[in-house]
Image (tube, rainbow, N blue to C red):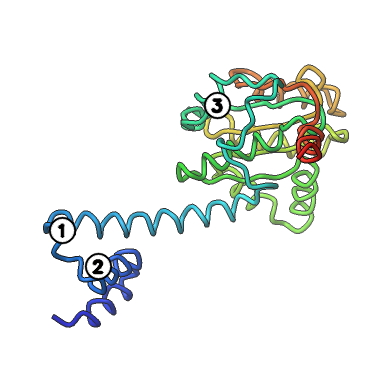
């Protein structure tokens, strides 16, 4: 048996995980420790893990998260209104499979963006496409897309994302044109995929962020009905972490 030829064939078929595991076994002379079934299972698992990790890296890169966050890093010891039971339910990503939305509100630094990114990371781990963007950048990009003729292409790209995270909504007023574009996005996604919106403002104050009341009604009706919510409160997590560091 020509092992080098086998490696070349595995490489040409892009079975890199399989090839690495097989090479490791042959170089360490561990073939005899496996039965045939165990050997095949080991090699298949190695290839599966390799492809999964590459896909995960690609999904994380495409998501453009503001920060790397995971569920393990969410601090549940600090009292700030996080419903632990709801958080654990959301961890399964079943809410995304059911095309439910999530609204996270709270003051600056309380952990809204971190929580949104942690949920986005969990979706990536479940092999779902995610996109993170601040509300202001999203509206700016939509405006530019309108100007250069790529608007409908951008809408189509966003519509294919399983979870869209819109961070820091409400920092500035949404004018009529921006409201129309935002409605296009929310309407395309409603009942088909999930959107997570974070804001310093309570949901009841979101209506006042729009220059056009009828657009506000249409957008908020789709976002708020049937959505999950976290209403966070308390001190800034940045301040709490700084205090912890200073005490060491």
Q: Is residue 168 left or right of residue 21?
A: right
Query: Mark 2 sits on what residue?
Result: 25
Q: Who is closer to the viewer here, 214 or 125?
A: 125
- In the rendered structure, find residue 34 and report the number of the disc placed on it: 1
Q: Earlier in the sequence, mark 1 or mark 2?
A: 2
- In this view, the residue in front, 1 or 52, is 1
- Residue ID for mark 3: 100
Image location (x, y in percent) of residue 210: 84, 28
Q: Residues within 10 Å of mark 3 (few under 14, many from 20)?
A: many
Quadrant for residue 126, please give it: top left
Residue 206 visible in the shown view: no
- Identify the image quadrant of residue 203: top right
Q: Is tag 3's residue or tag 2's residue first in the polypeptide sequence?
A: 2
Distance (Cα) linking label 1 and label 3: 46 Å
Q: Is residue 121 left or right of residue 43?
A: right
- Residue contact between numbered discs 1 and 2, judged by CB atoms under 8 Å: yes
Which residue is at a point 52% across and 27% down the rendered structure image?
Answer: 90
Q: Where, by quadrant of the figure, is residue 28 drawn?
A: bottom left
């Amino acid at each position: 048996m020509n092992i080098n030829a086998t490696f070349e064939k595995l490489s040409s078929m892009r079975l890199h995980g399989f090839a690495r595991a097989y090479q490791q076994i042959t170089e360490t002379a561990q073939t005899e420790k496996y039965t045939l079934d165990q050997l095949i299972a080991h090699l298949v698992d190695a290839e599966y893990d390799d492809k999964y990790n590459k896909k995960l890296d690609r999904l994380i890169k495409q998501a453009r998260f503001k920060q790397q966050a995971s569920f393990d890093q969410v601090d549940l010891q600090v009292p700030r209104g996080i419903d632990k039971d709801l958080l654990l339910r959301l961890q399964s990503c079943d809410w995304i499979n059911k095309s439910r939305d999530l609204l996270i509100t709270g003051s600056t630094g309380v952990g809204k963006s971190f929580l949104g990114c942690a949920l986005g990371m969990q979706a990536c781990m479940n092999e779902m496409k995610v996109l993170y963007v601040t509300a202001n950048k999203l509206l700016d990009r939509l405006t530019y897309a309108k100007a250069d003729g790529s608007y409908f292409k951008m809408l189509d790209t966003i519509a294919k994302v399983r979870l869209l995270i819109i961070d820091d909504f409400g920092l500035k007023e949404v004018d009529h044109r921006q409201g129309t574009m935002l409605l296009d996005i929310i309407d395309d996604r409603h009942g088909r995929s999930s959107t997570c919106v974070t804001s310093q403002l309570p949901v009841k104050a979101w209506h006042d962020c729009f220059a056009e009341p009828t657009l506000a009604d249409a957008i908020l009706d789709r976002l708020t009905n049937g959505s999950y919510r976290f209403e966070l409160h308390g001190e800034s997590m940045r301040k709490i972490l700084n205090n912890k560091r200073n005490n060491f």
